[in-house]
Image (spheres, grey):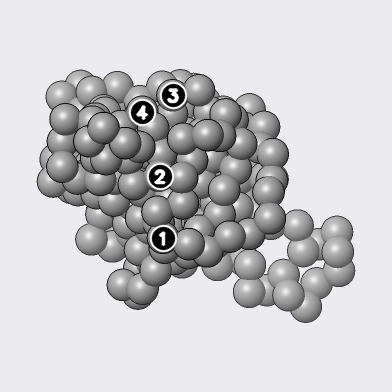
């Protein structure tokens, strides 16, 4: 489901659809020009240009589910520039792709989970996040819906939501919980959400498939 304006009770919907991505070799460069790409992918540890973001504005920053901060700077007559900063304040490695007029930024820490269908790709649609008012200067958190395999699992794991989850309320009809991820604790939230990853390192290939913590099936 598409994000709605923050003035309404917005929630990011759960979807099993995956964004079709076409990978290209890794590249680390400042001001990498994406204006010549159409539905293609670029990777940069510093900055990349992207279209489809408020050209009349100087710059906007949005904190992603992972705690990474994406800043979009208007390019004036030229393409806009997208820079990615990790939770540690350093430049972060991220895969940037443009789908139509929208720009998606996938931090390397989230790629596996998106590919496995555990995270809604729209959580990384920077164009829509900013357009719908989820930028850091406009919103204190990111509304999410986390789903569980069953109502019983949702009830049993309701008290073990990731750190930084606020305003949780049950959505019993779809075995889910609606919550808001506190932007200032996004890194801790992501760490708790992906806690099983550490255990998977010693598991078999089948057992080491990415999964989310606390019985959460999808976000």
Residue holding disc 3? 101
Gap between marks 3 and 4 measured at Cα: 5 Å
Name the residue furthest front: 77
The structure residue drawn at horizontal position 80% and vertical position 72%, both measured from the top left corner, is: 203
Mark 1 surroundings: few (<14), some (14-19) or many (≥20) residues within 10 A: some
Mark 3 surroundings: few (<14), some (14-19) or many (≥20) residues within 10 A: few
Question: In the rendered view, would you say 1 is above or below 26?
Answer: above
Q: Toward the viewer: 68 or 81?
A: 81
Q: Position of residue 36 (x, y in %)?
A: 52, 34
Residue 110 shows in the view: no
Q: Which mark is residue 30?
A: 1
Question: In the rendered view, would you say 38 is above or below 24?
Answer: above
Q: Secondary structure at mark 4?
A: loop
3 or 1: tag closer to the N-terminus: 1
Query: Is 139 placed left or right of 65 in the picture?
Result: left
Cβ atoms at labels 4 and 1 below 8 Å apart? no
């Amino acid at each position: 489901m598409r994000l709605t304006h923050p003035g309404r009770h917005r929630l990011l919907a759960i979807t099993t659809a995956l964004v079709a991505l076409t990978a290209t070799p890794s590249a680390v460069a400042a001001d990498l020009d994406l204006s010549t790409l159409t539905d293609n992918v670029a990777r940069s540890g510093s900055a990349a240009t992207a279209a489809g973001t408020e050209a009349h504005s100087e710059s906007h920053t949005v904190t992603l589910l992972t705690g990474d901060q994406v800043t979009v700077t208007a390019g004036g007559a030229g393409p806009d520039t997208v820079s990615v900063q990790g939770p540690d304040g350093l430049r972060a490695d991220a895969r940037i792709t443009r789908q139509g007029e929208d720009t998606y930024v996938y931090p390397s820490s989230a790629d596996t989970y998106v590919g496995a269908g555990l995270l809604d790709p729209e959580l990384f649609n920077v164009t829509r996040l900013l357009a719908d008012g989820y930028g850091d200067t406009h919103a204190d958190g990111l509304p999410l819906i986390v789903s569980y395999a069953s109502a019983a699992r949702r009830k049993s794991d309701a008290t073990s939501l990731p750190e930084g989850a606020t305003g949780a309320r049950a959505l019993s009809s779809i075995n889910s919980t609606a919550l808001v991820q506190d932007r200032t604790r996004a890194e801790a939230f992501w760490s708790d959400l992906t806690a099983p990853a550490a255990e998977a390192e010693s598991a078999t290939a089948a057992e080491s498939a990415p999964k989310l913590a606390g019985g959460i099936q999808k976000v």
